[in-house]
Amino acid sequence: MIKAFKGKIIRVFKNHSLPRWLVFLLDSAAVFFSFLIAYMLRYNFEVYTFDISTVFRQSYLVLAVYVTFNLIFKSYSGMIRHTTIRDTYKIIATNFSALAVLVLVTVMSRKNEWSSVFNIPVSILLIHCGAVTILLFLFRVFVKMFYEFASSSSHDRKNVLIYGSGEMGILVKRLIEGDPKDMYRLIGFIDDDKKIQGKNVDGYPVYSRKILTKYFIENENVQVFIIAINNIAFLKKKEVIESMIGFGCEILDTPSFDTWMNGHLEVKNLKKVKLEDLLGRDPITLDLEKIQNGLIGKTILVTGGAGSIGSEIARQLTRFNTKQLIIVDQAETPCFYLGEELKNKMPGFNFRIIVGDVTRKEYMEEIFKKYRPDIVFHAAAYKHVPIMELHPHEAFRVNVGGTELISELAMKYKAEKFVMISSDKAVNPTNVMGATKKICELLVHALSQRKGIKTQFITTRFGNVLGSNGSVIPLFNKQIAAGGPVTITHPDITRFFMTIPEACQLVLEAGFMGNGGEIYVFDMGEPVKVLDVAINLIRLSGLEPHKDIKIKYIGLRPGEKLYEELFSDDEPMIPTHHPKISIAQVADSDFETISLKIDVILATINTISEAKLIEEMMDIVPGYTSNIVSTL
């Protein structure tokens, strides 16, 4: 019976709230009747001792003054069920301002012998002010308590701990209390400040992180853990997430202020922490002045500009005063969405998106002829290893042929810089994709050695980027969402990981560091076991690996290595002034030889057999091994 009653009440509260005009009228009625009661109290309820008509006229004067200040301070405007200390301040400011004015009127009335309507006993004004303040406050507290009583029956609310009891923590606390969907129930704060541990903040206990044990989480039925600290250090954030990730809680993060809608935080802004947060790396420091000087007033061309890396390079470029940004990609739908994003987020930025294939010579030449790009970022390439093992002809045609064509056009139309995006799979390649990238590296490096070439050719090499198209992270997330299993090729396989923004920031930095011919290699941190990635993703979803989500090993795919490398044995590492960028010192390549071999393959790309194609690639890339030839 009580449950049914509570259910009806909470449904009413969720769908309806007291309108402001009604709160205003209720407050005004409280002012009016409490003044009459104040008179009765002052004269011990002996009504015959004062003039009733004068009292009523005075009550209208008092009401008018209180209503005026109520409109000024808007003490009626807050949602009653979510009354805060700030709402109490508004009530106090309204009532005491009205009291001061009425006392002043009384004093002036007595001094100037005004009408008795203005001569209100000060004792009555004081009694009335205290009474109406308490009455309005109790009214709000009663509504708030009644709402909490009714909403306590909501069985689907999740118990929440908030990490951080400062301003952001208090803001998140009020946010979840005021959520119309009533999804969460706060049970306390976690804070590292020993001075406030064991105390209450805004009515809730503050705990030390030492209390976060499996027993505590299960005993308190904690389902959600919200990180709510401004500018928390990356390593600290990683430590906190790792301490919670094994408890099966949903871990949410409070976004930075600039991502809030119209400066207001909403429950929907709270996002699940990402795998990137477990990298725990400090933000990259860029030489913004050098990059700005290199980009100001320039026309920039980004090939593969709608892909994961190319689109992020485009986003990064919007920070600088470029003349124009030209984005080329053959994928129609990603081009559309990127265009809409740039139009909405950067309405004044000058850009043009062109749908086109980087291997179409006449079309690409028209683009160079029309826009005359000063700087080219070449990110267009096929990169998915297993798919390229099955389609080596397309891998060579697009990756190598596209790079050769765009680099030739960059020289022909006197571009200042050509920056190619390579891969760690180009180091000691064992697959088609890696071999094509290595050939591109050799070609670009050979171009940089030619005499009389004014274009600076630069190569950037890095490993896997988290969340990129075709990467393992989106695949794992889909498998987890489907209930598993999560498929891993080998329990010991490792990979280097970097976030897309990190990689693209370093691409911009490297693009303006050298004089051409350098192969810049990015510091990817320590290699990470893919198994650990899968386990962390499962736990970040609030599930238990091997229990809720099974992990299945499917064996190494064709061309796949257990581990990746950023430098080969014959590439000494040379440091640069940037701690996250090094140079791979490679031997000079003969352009004529490499170019001739590439052109011969491209001329017969539609008729050459897979075995012959792989043999020709092995001839260009010493050390390249493939199992394709042996299986044909």
Image (cartoon, rainbow, N blue to C red):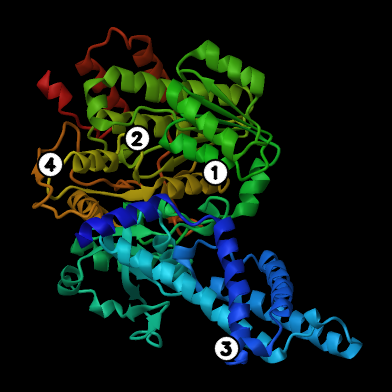
Please name the amino acid that badge 4 sits on: Pro
Which of disc 2 and disc 4 is earlier in sequence? 2
Please name the amino acid that badge 3 sits on: Phe
Please name the amino acid that badge 1 sits on: Gln
Q: Is residue 62 left or right of residue 91?
A: right
Residue at 43% x, 60% y is 178
Depth order, front residue of 586/154: 154
Q: Is residue 509 above or below residue 606?
A: below
Say what secondary structure mark 3 lies in. Answer: loop
Q: Which residue is mark 3?
A: 45
Q: CA distance from mark 2 to mark 3?
A: 81 Å
Residue at the far top: name it: 607
Please state the horizontal and vertical placement of residue 492, each as a whole percent of the image: 14, 50
Which of disc 1 and disc 2 is earlier in sequence? 1
Depth order, front residue of 535/356: 535
Q: Is residue 208 above or below residue 350?
A: below
Q: Which residue is mark 2?
A: 469
